[in-house]
Structures are given as C-alpha cells and as structure tokens.
Image: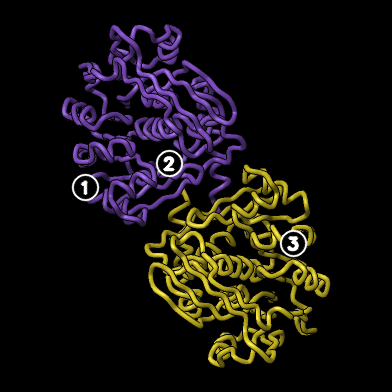
Chain colours: A purple, B yellow
C-alpha cells in the first residue's frame, strides 16, 4: 500500500564532532520518504523555495517518490542549522522558516487512495489540517517534538487523539504526559486514542507500547555515529514503510517494524545528512535486520 | 555446579524517593548469593562483625547458602549509607569499612571443588588474592566500580586479565578503557583476556559482548523502582547462578543468563534492600523470564 508523507523539506547546516556540512538536504519528509521508498510507494507533501537545488528534486524523482504534493513557492527554502557537541542532543543555531512559514499542506486527490499517512514533525495545526483532508486514511501516524509540546500542547493532543501511532522521544513523552515512568506515560497516551506509541531512546533504542504489547528494540550497534540528524525520521520512514508494505497492524508486524526502523536509523547516522539514506538498499536493510535478530533473539 | 561468591556483607542506610530504611542487609555478596541460590548451590565468602543481627545470618542459613567462608570478627560490620535523588545514581553519605578494612578472604578447602567463582565489587587486591587461592576455578567473573578504576587501575587490570567474565557499568567501561564507543570499549576488554564482558546500562538494560557475540537485554519493564541498591549484584547473581546451573559458557547459555540477570535485578529494585530478593522464587523468575521473551522475541 502506498504511504503519504507530510513534513518539512529543508536545507541544513550541520556540525558534529566528525565535521561540518552546509546546504545539505534536511527536513523530516525528506528523510522519511527516501527511506520508506525502499519498502514501496511514497508520496510526498511539502514545500520548497525556488532556491532548492535541482539535483535534490532529481533525487526524489530518481527514487520514484510521487511529487505531486511538492509545492514550489517563490522564495527561500526552510533552513536549519544545528551543532552537536555530544551526539545525543542538537543545539539549534538558527531556524529560518522562509516559505515553510506559509505552508498550507494540500493533499492531491491522487494521494487520497493511499491507506497510510505519516505526519512528520511540523506544527500540530498543519497535522490537524492534513488529518481533516485525509479522513479516509486507515492508518495514521505522527511525530512531534518538545517545541510543540511546550508551545501548542492542546493542538498536539487533538492530533494525538486522531492518530493510530505516535512517535515520540523519551524526554518528550515525560514532558507531554507529566508522568515520570515511561511505561505509565505510554499507557496515558494510549488512553487518548492511539493504538501504539513508539518511544525513542536515542542510543538506547526504542520500545513500542500497545494495548497488549510491550516490545523493545535495542539500537543496531553502530561503531561511529557521524550525524544523528534525521535519525527519528529515518526510523519512522522504515517503520511506516514496512507496515504499509505488509498492510497490517498486528503485533507481529509492529515488532518487525520496530526492527526495520532501528535498522534504517542506524544506516542514516553513519554519514552526514542523507548521504547514506539516499544509497540505502533493501538488501542492506535486510542484512542489518538479520544482524539485529542475532543481537536480540535467544 | 556450585558457585563461590566473594564480596562485601554489610548493613546499609538507604534513602530513595520512596522512603528510608536503616540497618538493613547490604553488600555485594549478600545480594548475589541469595539470588544465585535460586539456581543451585551458593557458597559465601565474606566478613561480618559481632553486631551483625542473628536473624540475618539465619536468613542465609534458611536459604542453605554455605557459610563456611563467612568470618565473624570482633568489631562492627561494614556499613554504607546512600541517598538516591534520582534513581540512576547513589550519593554515598558514609562508608564505614569497620571489620571489612582487615578482610583477608580465605577460601575454605571445601569450596575449592566448585567450578564457578564470582568476585563481587571489592578491592582488586582482594580479588587477586582470591583468584590466586582458587586457581582451579574453571569459570571466574568479577564486578568492579569507578572507585577502583580511579584508585587501583593497574591492580584491577591484573584481575580482568585473569577472569572469564567482567561485569561493568557503561560509564565505568568508558572510564577504564578511555574508549567512548561502548562496543569498541568492550572489544578492548576482550583483548585483555575475558571471554565476555557484560555492560550494564541502568534503566536501559545491558548487553554482553564476546568474541562472536553481541546480545542485548532490555530491562524488564518495572513500574516503580523503589530502591536500586544491589541491582548489579542481583544481576550478577542471576547470571552466574544460571550459568553455574547449566555448567556451560556457550553463546546460547550466555544469552539466557543475560535475561535471568535482568529478571533478578528487576525483582530486586521493586523493594528496599533484600526485601524482595529474600522472597524471590524460581517460579517468579521463570514467569518474568517468559515475559521478557515476549518483550524481545519477534
């Protein structure tokens, strides 16, 4: 089944202990769509300015990602600059919304037959807007971040009430629910509506919590994290790509999706920006998936 | 096969967000031996003062833990006081070595037929001393702590060169090896001699690293951590108890031992001191082990 991905598309300047890159592809929808495309058919919704390099658009085209929902607007593309002093947390150096400030995501009619929808980390108002346009989506998921938990909590909760799957960091779920124990916090999210909440714990992996499911995925043992940017989006891209391919939400599929997300995130962080993501193949994903089984299965 | 456990036996004062207890059983050997006894035959080596409450000695006896190696010396028992502001790290309020200051562990002759030896967290000099007395032990393991890494590093490395299994925290292995990536740090330990290094990551579980093995064990999802004291010792007790029962060091046994250690540590932390540890049964351990399989197996 095809998967619609809505989120930011940007140009990043990134500095990590491994080096520095400028003007590289960024944004939640960029990472998630390129990763998810390994599993099937991704349809992108986003906005870029006229300064967005043509080779970047060509990359999406080469990957056969549907671009009917990609709006190109006069002006500059969304830009983000970040620096990682340690690899667990980015310090934002600047955020220039540019054309993203006026983003009003429109889901093309041709996308509305998709059953799967992933809402990357954008303003909950936009996420709600998309959910309202796309009421036929059978499986909806969203990501978020601390910025919205602090600044648009009520709207975010409206989004969470409507989605089936929430992707969220450990710190964020504690902040959002004001519950310290992460399993209790996840339980509180389920009460709002979602079937599953995926709690991401950085270098310690992630777990998914459902009505009759707790399942843990450790990280794939990466030897050198070069750039963590987009790891969460790559995780979501792998997870959503796999469940849309399987067209299933049973616990067994969700467990495997946790491992696919883990694997795609691990490939992401081993190079800057989307350098590894754009070269990712399903063969490499399957190889790491098997290695992850060895690390976890008795 | 029986398991000899050498370590501290003490009386603790503990304060956590859940409350405060005083004069309760503590010490690495206390936790490890009572836990390991669920799997077979533990033989204790340690020292206490004449003030050690008789009911505590009776507890070891009721558990059928061999006490021939328990020395009772005129004077006061080792005492430790700690406070947990958050549950990840204890602040030591006091350490009174008392009779432990002169501890010179002697392995009784009747213990020397044991094939398994666990050296709890004590001075590396004492660990070396025991290893020299017990050169027939086929499987040896030790735990340690930052205090010895800082204060007795060369001696500790001598110990590590002689043991088959090292239990160590994530921060400690980084500090000991001066290697930031934990897998590379574990690799550096293997080069010193051990077959396996078990890296403990607190609420994020643990992993074991061997020549052709990386295996991850998440924590058992505990809803309320009451007192983390002894969690590492209970982990080691479960791990060593299981491998001594199986009398095997193959990868499959080591993987299962990681889960047994995880389970016994999880039972420990749900109450103060050894309150839960002393009532632990193999039935409860097996129940949680099965639950841990559900959380991790595809």
Badge nearest the viewer, 2 or 3: 3
Residue A216 image label: none
Residue located at (19% from left, 37% from top): A155
Q: Secondary structure at mark 1?
A: helix
Q: Residue visible at 42% across and 65% down?
A: B225
In the image, residue A159 lies at what x, y percent? 22, 37
Q: Is residue A66 left or right of residue B237?
A: left
Measuring from the top left, give residue B61's x and y in whole percent.
59, 89
User: Are the residues tagged 1 and 2 within 8 Å (C-beta)?
Assistant: no
Question: Could you tell me which residue is drawn at 39 percent across and 46 percent down?
Answer: A170
Residue B124 placement: quadrant: bottom right
- Give the residue at x 69% y 65%: B142
Nearer the observer, A166 or A18:
A18
Label placed on residue A258: 2
Give residue A65's quadrant in the image: top left
- Marks 3 and 1 close (CB-CB < 8 Å): no
Q: Is residue B101 visible?
A: yes
Q: Chain of mark 3?
A: B
Mark closer to the chain start, 1 or 2: 1
Of badges 1 and 2, nearer the viewer stands: 1
Quadrant where the image shows the N terminus of chain A:
top left
User: What x and y, as percent, mark residue B25?
Assistant: 54, 81
Residue neighbourhood size for the residue with mark 2, other residues' Cα within 10 Å, grouped as few (<14), some (14–19), many (≥20): many
Q: Position of residue B295 (x, y in %)?
A: 43, 54
Helix, strand or loop under label 2: helix
In front here: A242 or A29? Answer: A29
Q: Which residue is mark 1?
A: A192
| Image position of A73 with respect to A13: above or below | above
**Neighbour class for label 1 at 10 Å: few (<14), some, many (≥20)?**
some
Labels 2 and 3 touching (C-beta < 8 A): no
Circle 3 residue: B152
């Amino acid at each position: 089944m095809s998967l619609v991905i809505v989120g930011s598309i940007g140009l990043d300047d990134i500095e990590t202990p491994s080096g520095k890159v400028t003007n590289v592809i960024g944004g939640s929808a960029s990472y998630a769509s390129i990763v998810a495309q390994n599993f099937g058919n991704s349809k992108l919704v986003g906005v870029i300015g006229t300064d967005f390099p043509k080779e970047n658009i060509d990359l999406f085209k080469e990957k056969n990602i549907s671009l009917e929902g990609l709006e190109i607007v006069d002006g500059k593309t969304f830009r983000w600059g970040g620096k990682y002093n340690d690899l667990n947390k980015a310090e934002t150096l600047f955020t220039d919304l540019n054309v993203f400030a006026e983003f009003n995501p429109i889901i093309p009619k041709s996308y509305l037959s998709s059953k799967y929808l992933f809402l990357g980390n954008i303003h909950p108002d936009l996420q709600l807007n998309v959910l309202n346009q796309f009421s036929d989506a059978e499986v909806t998921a969203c990501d978020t971040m601390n910025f919205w938990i602090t600044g648009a909590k009520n709207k975010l909760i409206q989004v969470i009430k409507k989605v089936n799957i929430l992707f969220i960091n450990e710190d964020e779920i504690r902040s959002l629910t004001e519950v310290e124990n992460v399993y209790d916090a996840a339980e509180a999210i389920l009460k709002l509506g979602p079937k599953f909440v995926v709690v991401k714990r950085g270098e310690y992996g992630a777990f998914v919590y459902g009505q009759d499911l707790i399942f843990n995925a450790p990280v794939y043992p990466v030897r050198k994290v070069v750039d963590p940017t987009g790891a969460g989006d790559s995780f979501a891209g792998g997870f959503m790509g796999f469940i849309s391919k399987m067209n299933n939400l049973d616990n067994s599929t969700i467990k495997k999706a946790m491992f696919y997300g883990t694997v795609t995130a691990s490939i992401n962080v081993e190079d800057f920006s989307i350098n590894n993501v754009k070269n990712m193949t399903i063969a490499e994903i399957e190889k790491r998936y098997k290695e992850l089984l060895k690390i976890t299965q008795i």
